[in-house]
């Protein structure tokens, strides 16, 4: 290809691939590179802009570590993560939503009715629901991986003041398919703006806020795994989630519960005198 | 945007931009994100593929440092760097070509006729030419930033066995517009395959070789800067440069020179008994 031109370079790229390349790789990479070339041609991308873009990627990469995943965040804020969720979300089940960069694996087991609030201040929140199939039958033995922010708006991986697994728990449903736990009410928060994504927000005149939410990953044998989050209906950022994670069926409602009404069957039963909030939200899985 | 769907998410992304965003940023970022979304929709990108892509970017970022720029290399091997060059190359001047990841700034001055071969083994190569304008007039005071591989196929920044500026020099033309230096004959080499790009090559069934070449950045007041490289016509990789850098007008010819013909006016004049190779290549700049 000593005659490479702006018009045949995409073809040249495709021609460099070996004959026995995985067909799906050829399809995905071919589409991606074709779109990147089309983009460069369409805007007549300059050397300075190209360099700025590469520096942005390099800076994003250099602040990544085991707990910081700036490219996930980048994918989130440009809507790519949500788009992938939407492409594979099934309307007959609970919608999926962005995983986000703060999930950590290995969450400790949390008994049904267990508590994640622990020593933290903030409004007590009781959450429960049924993990069920699309016919409404409860699913036994489903695992529900739960995580959320502390009252300061930080996840444990961002916050030296929290233990590794603060506000993380892994619950397994019994025959009734029920998950249930107490925690603090999650708060809205800004995604990290101290790295390149902060510059991106500034340049785009955008805010970094997400509405408050609870994260779930629900898995059960024979069903598609569900990665999702649920949002309260009165959150000020519900219609401007900076990572495009809100779906209509993921909006839930807090009920304000009066003092003296805290139910049995929870780790905190008998220890709660005052008012609390309650949310009921069922999670519907689709068969594989 | 609690009603975000796979069809309106691109619009939602555009809608998040502030009203007073730089119009060029809006154009470039809008086009890029539109193409990325179209790509994801077109191939129905899965979560696993998305994750693989983000991990690839993260791994690429995490091996970057002051001297290693994996994203430049990534841009090179997918043809994006060359495409940007081609978009802005002017047919009336010498074609531009990829900068590559191995340029370092601050090269030491090299007198016209100076030597870069130094203590290194390998065939002696004499290179010279005129830096001129599109009417053929020599340009005085042009700087020619020259760099190349050592005989082992490595640039100084890759090779602890070389000094920082081995095979790097900055020459300034006199009234005759002439640049001239001696060095070793550059060799073909593989771009670094010990990082994520190596996995990319393997997956694509591609080799990592570049034809041998000399790099130049030529700058002169009143002219567009030229980033380019020149390639010998007999190089086995001329038609399969893994970074798509070859252009027809950048192909040059080595002349085999007999013993006893080494000219005056070079740092090595009077010290060369044997045969050597010679290349003449003029560099034409376009006015700004």
Image: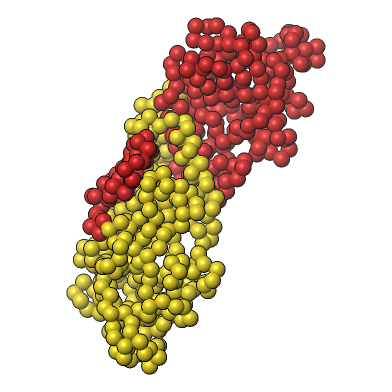
Chain colours: A red, B yellow
Q: Position of residue A156 (x, y in %)?
A: 67, 35
Asked if residue A15 lies left or right of residue A171, the reply is left
User: Which of the pair B186/B123 is nearer the observer?
Assistant: B123
Asked if residue B108 lies left or right of residue A190, the reply is left
Residue at image x 69%, y 17%? Answer: A181
Q: Position of residue A63 (x, y in %)?
A: 57, 48
Residue at image x 45%, y 50%? Answer: B197
Looking at the image, the residue that sits furthest to the bottom is B270
Asked if residue A237 lies left or right of residue B76, the reply is right
Residue at image x 73%, y 38%? Answer: A161
User: Which of the pair A163/A133 is nearer the observer?
Assistant: A133
Asked if residue B174 lies left or right of residue B64, the reply is left
**Residue A125 appears in the rendering:** no
Residue at image x 54%, y 53%? Answer: B63
Quadrant containing the N terminus of chain A in the rendered view:
bottom left
**Residue B46 appears in the rendering:** yes
Q: Position of residue B240 (x, y in %)?
A: 30, 56
* Rendering quarter of residue A221: top right
């Amino acid at each position: 290809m000593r005659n490479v031109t702006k018009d045949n370079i995409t073809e040249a790229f495709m021609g460099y691939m070996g004959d026995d390349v995985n067909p799906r790789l050829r399809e995905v990479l071919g589409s991606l590179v074709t779109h990147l070339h089309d983009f460069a041609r369409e805007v007549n991308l300059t050397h300075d802009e190209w360099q700025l873009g590469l520096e942005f990627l390099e800076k994003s990469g250099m602040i990544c570590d085991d707990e910081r995943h700036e490219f996930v965040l980048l994918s989130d804020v440009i809507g790519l993560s949500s788009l992938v969720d939407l492409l594979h979300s099934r309307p007959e089940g609970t919608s999926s939503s962005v995983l986000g960069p703060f999930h950590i694996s290995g969450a400790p087991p949390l008994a049904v009715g267990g508590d994640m609030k622990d020593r933290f201040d903030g409004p007590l929140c009781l959450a429960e629901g049924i993990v069920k199939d699309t016919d409404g039958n409860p699913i036994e033995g489903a695992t529900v991986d739960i995580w959320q922010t502390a009252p300061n708006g930080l996840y444990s991986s961002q916050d030296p003041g929290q233990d590794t697994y603060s506000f993380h728990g892994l619950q397994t449903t019994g025959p009734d398919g029920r998950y249930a736990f107490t925690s603090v009410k999650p708060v809205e928060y800004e995604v990290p703006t101290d790295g390149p994504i902060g510059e991106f927000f500034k340049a785009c005149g955008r805010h970094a806020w997400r509405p408050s939410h609870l994260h779930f990953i629900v898995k059960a044998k024979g069903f598609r795994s569900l990665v999702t989050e649920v949002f309260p209906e009165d959150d000020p950022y519900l219609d401007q989630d900076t990572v495009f994670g809100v779906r209509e069926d993921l909006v839930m409602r807090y009920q304000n519960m009066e003092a003296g009404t805290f139910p049995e069957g929870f780790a905190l039963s008998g220890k709660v005198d005052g008012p609390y909030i309650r949310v009921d939200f069922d999670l519907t899985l689709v068969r594989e």
